[in-house]
Amino acid sequence: MCGIVGYTGPREAYPIIIKGLKRLEYRGYDSTGVALQNSGLKVYKKKGRVAELEDMMIGKDIHAHTGIGHTRWATHGEPSDRNAHPHSSASGKLAMIHNGIIENYAQIKKELSNKGYTFSSDTDTEVLLNFIEEIQKNNQCNLEEAVRIALKRVTGAYVILLIDETHPDTIIAARKGSPLVIGIGKGEHFLGSDATPMLEYTKEVVYVNDYELAIIKPDELILKNLGNEKITPYVQKLDMELAAIEKGGYEHFMLKEINEQPETIYDCLRGRLDITTGTITMAGVEKEMERLIHANRIVIVACGTSWHAGLVAEYIFEELCRIPVEVEYASEFRYRNPVIFPGDVIIAVSQSGETADTLVAIEKAKDQGALIFGVVNVVGSSIARASQAGAYTHAGPEIGVASTKAFTAQLAVLTMVALKLAKQKNTISEERYLHLVNELHAIPEKVAIVLESAPLIKALAEKYKDAEDFLYLGRGYNFPVALEGALKLKEISYIHAEGYPAAEMKHGPIALVDENLPVVFVATRDSFHEKVVSNMQEIKARKGKVIAVINEGDTDTAAICDDVMTVPEANEIVAPMLSTIPLQLLAYYIGLAKGYDVDKPRNLAKSVTVE
Ligand code: AGP
């Protein structure tokens, strides 16, 4: 989710671009840059925040009336000066910024390399830019036509802004899969990955659609499709305020990120899970395949929500790969004197990639010869760099302190890794493997269905918001979901909530049950369902209030509950990505009903980089 800004018109471009980039930093940044039409094309870029770019620009000639700017959320290539955008073409006459992922960039890069092209970055963006320039040179066509030809060849998602030294007042832009907004001014035009950078200058905007290409000059906007047919721009009047846009129109980042999950899980699977061929492509797994499939043991180290993802993974890896798994709180693991064998595989799960306990834990294990496999959201973060292999979750920046979309993305990645290893080890039948691949592929759509029940869950939140304690219970794959639901409630509403294996109740905690205690069961249909229903009966028999996450149509279970939240049926191995959603919403709406800051809960930090 990169930030994109462009301007062409009578004003000084640089201040507009820099201010716009600062407004887009919430979308994630690890590096940033600008390209200015200033008697030739000038590109300035560096790793770090926009403020650091500004410092670098002091004293430079920043006069320009046309320019583009970018804040990067890395997907290909570590955060660094050379991987920052804008990228320059081989000739130096073109500069481009890009948001999205070009999935077939490796093939295109190989073709260009065979023609003698060299690359100064690891990014897919530079490959696309040189591909465009190569087409322009080869076909003797104008830049607009070269862009059209190139975009018909690439697969993946993109928003690109391209400027050309030989046409200093023109910006060429195109979009597929990532947002692009054009602001209409008087004799000037603004561009952005959302409307945030242009709101103070104009509220008249054109939202570019997929497969559309725009040629923008100060006093002219031409919109075309990739078939070179002109399209009449549909100008809308923005009625959103600045703050609302950063949250995509949602009241809070947490609610936005909960609702992003169909898209973020899809992004996590994209380019990896292919249901037509039944293959799962993960370079980080393939490069260490031998050590992974011959692991004597997998030790998962993580904290908080990521630790819950590790617990789900424990069930999945043991079930599918028949490898013993232990899940460790990183903070405990690092202070023990753990016995680690060179044949061990350590899976480090972390959204931020900067959690100190997890980082120290893996360094300790690495010193004893284990293989470190990182499942991380922030590209180039410390834990990602400390891992010898890994897989990014591609959930985009998670701003809300309570982790939501990162959790389901972690589950998606861990499930793909387990399936890939199980197939390699032959510990799973082809039929079951293909069934689970299809089940995983269907998750984004099913998550969207669960999100439609938000109004019902909001009503439940109103009903139970004054409870002083909650219990969350589940079995098997849903036990970690119960723990995660309890953590979400604690974090956001400050209500005491405990997660427990449902079967564990009879060993003491059932003494807590009375008519004031809401007990949330995660009770989707799986191999433990009947047992969980018996546990519900035990709670009801003691006047406890039973709230349950159940499958759509499960009327028998609904009949014994006080309230239910429903999710579509899914195989128990992928079901946690669904059953966790109602619990995220329940925590959000209870916190909201209690008037708390759900994005920045008291006492919490987004990334715990202290010990
Ligand atoms: C999750 O809602 C919490 N904010 C917290 O438990 C978090 O999961 C934990 O600090 C681990 O963070 P990480 O995934 O960035 O390593």
Image (cartoon, grey):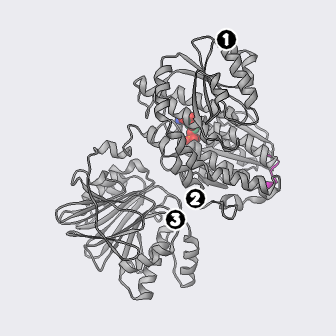
Please state which amino acid type lies under the numbered disc 1: Arg
Say which residue label 1 marks: 542
* Residue 328 picture location, percent across and down: 70, 36
Q: Earlier in the sequence, mark 3 or mark 1?
A: 3
State the CA–CA distance, disc 3 to disc 1.
55 Å
Question: Pointers 2 and 1 in contact (CB under 8 A)?
Answer: no
Pair 2/1: label in front: 1
Side (left or right) of 363 relative to 196: right
Q: Residue at x 68, y 11 (%)?
A: 511
Q: Is residue 518 placed above or below 123 in the rendered structure?
A: above
Q: Is residue 558 left or right of residue 323?
A: left
Point out which mark residue 270 bears.
Answer: 2
Residue at numbered disc 3: 156
Work out whether 530 lies above or below 177: above
Q: Residue at x 25, y 73 (%)?
A: 169
- The reply to whether the C-beta atoms of the residues labelled 3 and 2 are less than 8 Å apart is yes
* Magenta span main SS: loop
Give ligand 1's quarter of the image: top right
Residue type (three-letter) at the residue carrying disc 2: Arg
State yes or no: residue 166 in magenta.
Answer: no
Kindly identify the amino acid type of the residue bearing the numbered disc 3: Gly
Q: Name the residue: 56% across, 53% down.
A: 266
Name the element at disc 1: loop
Image quadrant occupied by the N terminus: bottom left
Report the span colored magenta.
Answer: 293-297
Q: Is residue 295 magenta?
A: yes
270 or 378, nearer to the observer: 270
Neighbourhood count class around disc 2 (C-alpha, 10 Å): few under 14, some 14–19, many 20 upward: some
Residue 264, position as x, y percentages in the image: 53, 50
Between 125 and 502, the one lying in front of the other is: 502
The secondary element bearing badge 2 is classed as loop
